[in-house]
Image (tube, helix red, strand yellow):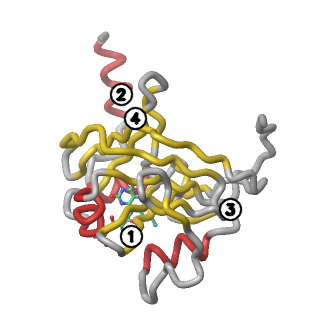
Amino acid sequence: MADSQKEDNQEARQGPVTPERYRQVLGRFPTGVTLVTGMDGDEPLAIVIGSFVSVSIDPPLVGFFIGSNARTWQRIRKGGSFCVNVLADDQVDMAEAFFARERDPWEGTDWVPGLSGSPVIPSCVASIDCSMFDLMDAGDHYFVVGEVIDLRDHGTGGSPLVFLGGSYGPVGASFRLGP
Ligand SMILES: Cc1cc2nc3c(=O)[nH]c(=O)nc-3n(C[C@H](O)[C@H](O)[C@H](O)COP(=O)(O)O)c2cc1C
């Protein structure tokens, strides 16, 4: 790299990589909002997850990142399966209820057991039911990879919920979605 280019890069730096700047700058990147569900015995469990990502088509794999200290994940993990429910833009209350857990968020949330036994929430846009495929260390998170065993497009016509800069919102543009 030329010296002049290095100087330009130095000038462009806005400061060191601190947790605060990491949060602020990464907050410029939008994510979808999902509820990752699972069972502990007879008890349905769910975690609000924004880091959901499609990984591989053959074999069909998806993944997400979970904080290594997340308590609910420790319980879902034991069951060896999970289901990713994609929230719609009119389900902000549901996201907040499952995040805050001030009251039982399952009260008033209809669900059915998926193929894996994990809760499928039919009012969501889509549900991706998985068995555990791999779990990798990733700093203060784990990367959880699931093998997709069942897929449901709930056909609600709902548009997915977006999380950006600490706020929920709609996608903000009309996309032509196939059948
Ligand atoms: C919109 C949104 C997205 C989130 N995405 C993630 C995520 O991708 N990974 C994660 O570990 N926690 C995420 N969280 C935080 C978790 O929902 C949860 O609070 C955290 O895992 C602690 O869980 P616990 O109470 O079971 O310990 C997100 C929260 C919100 C509101």
Q: Quadrant of ligand 1?
A: bottom left
Query: What amino acid type is highlighted by mark number 2?
Result: Asn
- Does residue 32 appear left or right of residue 61 in this picture? right
Location of mark 4 (residue): 12
Query: What amino acid type is highlighted by mark number 4?
Result: Ala
Question: What is the secondary structure assignment of the residue under circle 2?
Answer: helix
The answer to whether the residues at label 2 and label 4 have Cβ atoms under 8 Å apart is yes
Label 3 and label 4: CA atoms lie apart by: 36 Å
Residue lying farthest bottom? 103
Under 8 Å from ligand 1: the CB of mark 3? no
Up-down relation of residue 35 to residue 59 (above or below) = below
The spot of residue 44 in percent (x, y) is 40, 71
- Residue sitting at x 41%, y 45%: 130
Disc number lying in front (3 or 4): 3
Nearest the camera: 136 or 134? 134
First in sequence: mark 3 vs mark 2: 2
Label 1 and label 2: CA atoms lie apart by: 46 Å
The answer to whether the residues at label 1 and label 4 have Cβ atoms under 8 Å apart is no
- Residue sitting at x 38%, y 46%: 64
First in sequence: mark 1 vs mark 2: 2
Disc number lying in front (1 or 2): 1
Location of mark 1 (residue): 45
Question: What is the secondary structure assignment of the residue under circle 1?
Answer: strand
Under 8 Å from ligand 1: the CB of mark 4? no
Question: What is the secondary structure assignment of the residue under circle 4?
Answer: helix
The spot of residue 54 in percent (x, y) is 48, 36
**Label number found at residue 89:** 3
Location of mark 2 (residue): 9
Query: What amino acid type is highlighted by mark number 1?
Result: Leu
The answer to whether the residues at label 1 and label 2 have Cβ atoms under 8 Å apart is no
Residue lying farthest top? 2
The spot of residue 162 in percent (x, y) is 60, 55
